[in-house]
Image: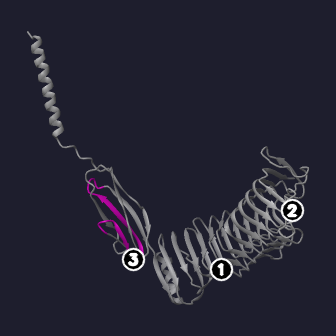
Amino acid sequence: MFTKRHLRNIRFMIGFMLLIVLISCDSNPTKPVPVTGVSLNHTSLTLEMGMSETLIATVEPSKAKNQGILWSSSDENIAAVSEDGVVTAISGGTAIITVTTLDGGFGADCIVMVPFVFTVENTDQWNESVNFINENGNDKIFVIDVISFIGSQEIYFYDARGITVKINGNHHVTGYADTSANQNITINDIALEGAVVRGDGAILTMQGDSSIKNSKNSGVRVSNNGTFIMLDGIISENTAWLGGGVHIASTGTFILKGGTISNNRSLGGQVEDMGGGVYINSGTFIMLGGLISENYSSSFGGGIHATNNSVLIMTDGIVSKNRSGAITSAIYLDGDSSFIMSGGSISGNSSAALRLGAYPNDSALFSMTGGIISGNNFGVYLGGFSSFVMPGGTIYGSETTGVPEHLANGSFSLTKSPTATAKYGDETDIFPHTDGHIYHTNYTIIGR
């Protein structure tokens, strides 16, 4: 029979045994945390020959006991890697740098692309470099440095896909450029007689002291999801029926960041010759800077003509001193096209009849949220069920006479936004304030 004393002893013994078990467990070493993966700070690198870059591997989780890793290269003749993850470019081509954990064998890759560099001093070397790219060029990067005169050459890589090619002409290369699908070509200091960009992934970038002049079929033609990027240089003295300087069609895109489009003409003897500087048909023109000036159209859009659901976006740059033989000197829109202006300047354009900043017609939309329209007889002229929305920006009078210009002219109806802050006239004809300025009107004007 257990007494109270016996029960106390039993409880003491049980507690003592549990304490011994806990102390024993604490004295055992903690089970190591295993590695579950690894990652790199870069998944791809482009290195010129002789250059180095350090890859940093992160073993996961950070508390894993074994942080050991091994580095390897798929081709050490192209890119070598040290035991510390320093990658050095050796020769042209593509190599894969791999890091592998000692615990668990987890891996991560970085694709290293080393450009092939060609130094060209004569026509034979030019042809050799072009042939090499055509035969070996898929998914590789190339640089062609021309260091002496070779004359006119066609810049066309007919059978290579996924290539990136930069050509430094150094004022020694002239000719014609044709960029096809999945080709990314950059021309630097090259004088072209014309350029074509067409197909998905086709990109032609123009920079440096490059020029495109004297073409009889538009200076630049962009179509079929191709993209032309103009960083610098000049497109000038080109002539075509539609788009003397630039012709954009079939979902092509032209991005103007710098440089000049000037002295081009749409003049081919047709009934309507349009877009002296730029013609857009089912395409996109994005103006982030640069100058469109002194272009001429015998009909519409001395500077720019957009039609057939095209999109024109202007955030900076200048459209100035363009002319036309009809009534639209700067920018003409029709066919449900859209013009979104948030910056830049449209000024001092002229035509045989009137000086117009912008003419939306035929269900086109002009939305102005910033920028300046000035120095034209009419800042904006509407027609054909077009719309003008102005929540921001400024329209003011002639830079030379100070006479206020019309915000719009012709037949239109006015819908006043609830947030509008001003009235103009009796709201049948829209004029600026007496000081010739319009600020943030929040009006929507719909042409009849």
Viewer-nearest residue: 301 or 159: 301
Dot label at residue 50: 3
CB under 8 Å between discs 2 and 1: no
Type of the residue with mark 1 = Ser
Circle 2 SS class: loop
Disc 1 from disc 3: Cα separation: 32 Å
The residue under label 1 is 211
Residue at 75%, 72% in the rendered image: 277
Q: Can I make out residue 75 in this image?
A: yes
Residue 430 relative to residue 91: left or right? right
Q: Is residue 358 above or below residue 143?
A: above
Write down the quadrant of residue 231 in the picture.
bottom right
Q: x, y percentage for residue 410?
A: 90, 58
The residue under label 2 is 405
Write down the quadrant of residue 23 in the picture.
top left
Residue 346 relative to residue 404: left or right? left
Circle 1 SS class: strand
Q: Is residue 255 above or below residue 134?
A: above
Residue at 37%, 64% in the rendered image: 55
Q: Is residue 171 above or below residue 27?
A: below
Colour scheme shown: one colour
Viewer-nearest residue: 139 or 293: 293
